[in-house]
Every structure is written in structure tokens, then in C-alpha cells.
Amino acid sequence: MEIVRLHLARIGALNDIPVHGFVIKHPRAGAILVDTGIGSSAELIKEWRIVNREVAEALAEHDLSPADVKIVINSHLHFDHCGQNAVFKHAPFYVQRSEVDRARAEEPTVTQWFDFAGARYELLDGDAEIVDGVRVVRTPGHTVGHQSVFVDTANGAAVMIGDAAYTSDIYRDVEKADLTQWPGQHANRGDWERSLVKVQAMRPHSVHFCHDTRVIHA
């Protein structure tokens, strides 16, 4: 299976970080999209100094269209991870049940982006296999319902870690990481540290980040 990184945005107000989504090219299930980027909101774009991009444009760079995406997995439901879900109304969305409950209660601005009419959710309660060779692992801490996506590749397991760690340095350092410039990295410090230790213990061959262009290889 091939993993393709999409460049979807930059957030100027948070260390000018990139926003990435990922496409898993599954030989039988088709294209699986992990996270959809930021939606259209003048208020958010101004507040966070966002340079945004249409997910369809990012897909086209890899000879894909939204219609090619058969499954969407949201790592969690913050504005920069589910903002363009509605582009994929035809696809099911795999999200932790606890994350949908949290976002409905806490994210009034973002709710319209993931809770639109006709949205088809496959609600998960913990670790789960999505299709052969693709599974989600619950990694709470950034949010209560955060999940990371593991993919079996020829070289071993690859993980798209979402916001479980913003950067490769934070992933490596965990409890020793300097988070002074990274507000919002965790909502629950204990859960966050345990989740990163859990991912590291699974010894992924490669770790892909939503907000860092570097990839960690084992």
C-alpha cells in the first residue's frame, strides 16, 4: 500500500505549521483519506492567519478526485482535520464515538463541517480494523477521542499520528518535550503521554505527522 501526503494549508498563528492530509492507496478498498483539512471560514482564516487550499486541488496533484475517495478517517474533529468532510458526502466517516460527542458539545463553529445533513458515520469504540491492513488505534490526550491510523506496508507498519504529536521532536521527546510554543498539544497530559508511549511501543517503521513535513523512520 502507498501513502500519499497532501498539503492542505498553513497556520500562520501557530508557528506557521503545515496542515497535511494523507491518502492510503488500498489495492482493494480504493483510496482512503485521513483528515480533510480546513473549511471555508473567514473568521477562522483571519484569526489563525491561515493559507488554505481545496482538498480537491491537492488530490488532483496525485491524479485523484474526491470521487476516488471511498473512505474517510478523521483522526479527530478539530477545525483543521474535518473542515472539508462535506466534499466527501458519498463516503463513510470513521471516527471515535467519544470524539463526535466531544465535538458536538465543544465545537459549535466546526459542527457544520462534520455534522452536515447526510453525513454517514461509522462510530468506533476503541481500536478497530477499517479494512485489511488499515486500522485505527485510540490515542486520547490531544482530545478525548483522538485516534491514529496504522497501515501495513512492505517495510512494516506506518502510522499517521494526527495531532497525537504535532512534530517529530515532540514525538521523540514525549514527557521531556518543550511544549511552551505548542499550546493545545494536550487536553489531558497523562493520557497524551500514555498514548505516545503506546504508539512507540508498537514500533512503527515510519511516523507521518499532520503538522510536520519530516517523517520518522525506525
Image: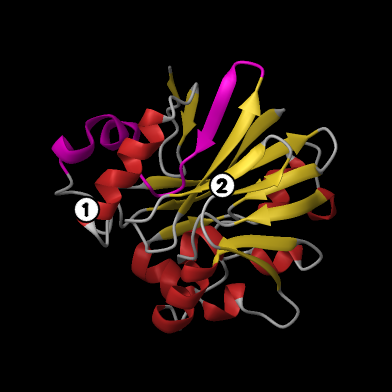
Quarter-wise, where is residue 197 in the image? top left
Say if 207 sits above or below 130 in the image.
above
Residue 22: give x, y in percent of width and height: 61, 42
Q: Which residues are magenta?
A: 154-178
Is residue 21 at least partly visible in the picture? no
Q: Amino acid at mark 2?
A: Val
Residue 46: give x, y in percent of width and height: 40, 69
Quarter-wise, where is residue 144 in the image? bottom left
Badge 1 crowding class, 10 Å Cα cut-off, few under 14, some 14 to 19, many 20 or more, is few
Element carrying mark 2: strand
Q: In which quadrant is the C terminus drawn?
A: top left
Q: Identify which residue is drawn at 28% across, 45% down.
A: 194
Element carrying mark 1: helix
Mark earlier in primary sequence (2, 1): 2
Disc 2: which residue: 136
> Which mark, residue 190?
1
Q: Identify which residue is drawn at 46% across, 42% down.
A: 161
